[in-house]
Image (cartoon, rainbow, N blue to C red):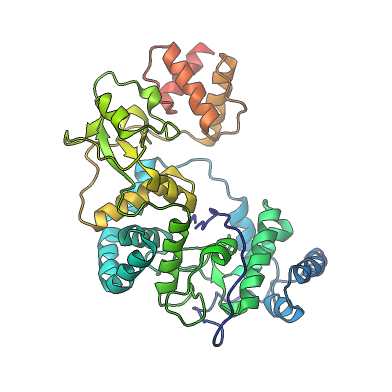
Amino acid sequence: MRGAMVLAISLLGTALGGCAAAEGPAEAPPPAARPESVAISASFAAWRNGFRSQALAAGISPTTFDRAFQGVGVSAEVLERDAFQPEFTRPIWEYLDRAVSDSRIENGRAALAAEGTTLAEIERRFGVDAAVVTAIWGIESAYGAQRGSLDVIESLATLAHQGRRRSFGEEQLVAALQILEAGDVAPRSMVGSWAGAMGHTQFIPTSYLAYAADFDGDGRRNIWGADPSDALASTANYLSRFGWTPGAPWGVEVRLPAGFDFSTVDQGNRQPVSVWQGRGVTRVDGSPIPDHGPAALLAPAGAGGPVFAVYNNFRVIKRYNNATSYALAVGHLADRLRGAGPFAADWPRGSRALSRAENIELQERLTALGYDTQGADGIIGPNTIAAIRAYQRANGLVPDGFPTADLLQRLATQG
């Protein structure tokens, strides 16, 4: 999971408050049993007592707080997951191979058919493509099969007490308690990921409070149970609230003419489609790029891989999880669920992703040569991409801003 992040850790929606339950709290599959050996340390108990005052000041009742924290301690699994920082990252094509696998496409088409009536009504009500909602469902929880089984209160309490993002943990924990206060779910049925993402489409608590929908009209916003309708509607509501354009695609694969200026291929460079058409950009079959408003060109693997024209809806998907690979996977999976084929252009599978240490070395070498990356943290962000482009232009290379082993080797010979 990453994710809504609504997500792993994706989105930080604004807490608006929950809705009152008409009946008893919704139930979900029980969380994994808490190890008997987990002890409440003195430091955790002191933190919990201090946080209790904070929660009560935010409107949480003493009864709700005490029920929520009954038996809750520090989760070793959450601490381990929070501290984990992989040395190597997967290339985008490997991520897509898994996110948009044959089995995920097959299962997604079955899910789209099984929930067809519900998804059609959700699309009518919120204006968001049913295939896109289904694709998010598939990537977030394998169409509900992997919704998470960790106690969310314990996970967030662990992060708030001693995680790397304590302010995030506290904010989400208050929101989780507000959900319990509203009665949408019972404390031990509020289960999810190690980062507190919950349900079929993995909403974090603040996003739940702001965007969760009671689609079936039972008085609860139940994203945890077997019935996915509230979760799917919540996802559609989220995308709609962030500006989804009904009837428009996320993007299309395109072909660039020979000698095209790759420095203009940047997600931040949104232009009228007529501009790209005037520069010779077409769909891969040679037909004109469709006009669905301003578009940017995206080359997630540099000049050696596929190129896409991406529209507003691509940016909206990134509000759900701000990773280009994620948004591309959602868009592509949605297309495949409708019957489209794979991308036309090949990925540069002979290349490899640089390790974090190699990214740091690349940043340091670029900066030493006068192409300042504004720091060397191993994360390839806009500053590093701009520095790579500047170096590439100065050395007669295609300025795609993409870090490769060949580029690092070239820099090493000049250091």
Residue 287 vs 138, above or below: the answer is: above
Which image quarter: residue 229? Answer: bottom left
Q: Between 355 and 177, which is closer to the camera in this rendering?
A: 177
Residue at (30, 68) in percent of width and height? 120
Q: How far across and how far down the image is residue 159, in percent?
A: 67, 59
Q: Position of residue 237 (x, y in %)?
A: 45, 62
Foreground residue among 214 and 175? 214
- Examine the image and state in which quarter residue 71 appears: bottom right
Q: Residue furthest bottom?
A: 23
Nearer-the-camera pick, 2 or 222:
222
Residue 239 coordinates in the image, percent (x, y): 44, 56
* 299 lies above or below 79: above
In the image, residue 257 above or below residue 25: above
* Residue 218, visible in the rendered structure: yes
Front in this rendered view, residue 150 or 232 = 232
Tell me where residue 397 sits by quadrant. top left
Residue 70 position within the rendered picture, expressed as x and y whole percent measured from the top left = 70, 78
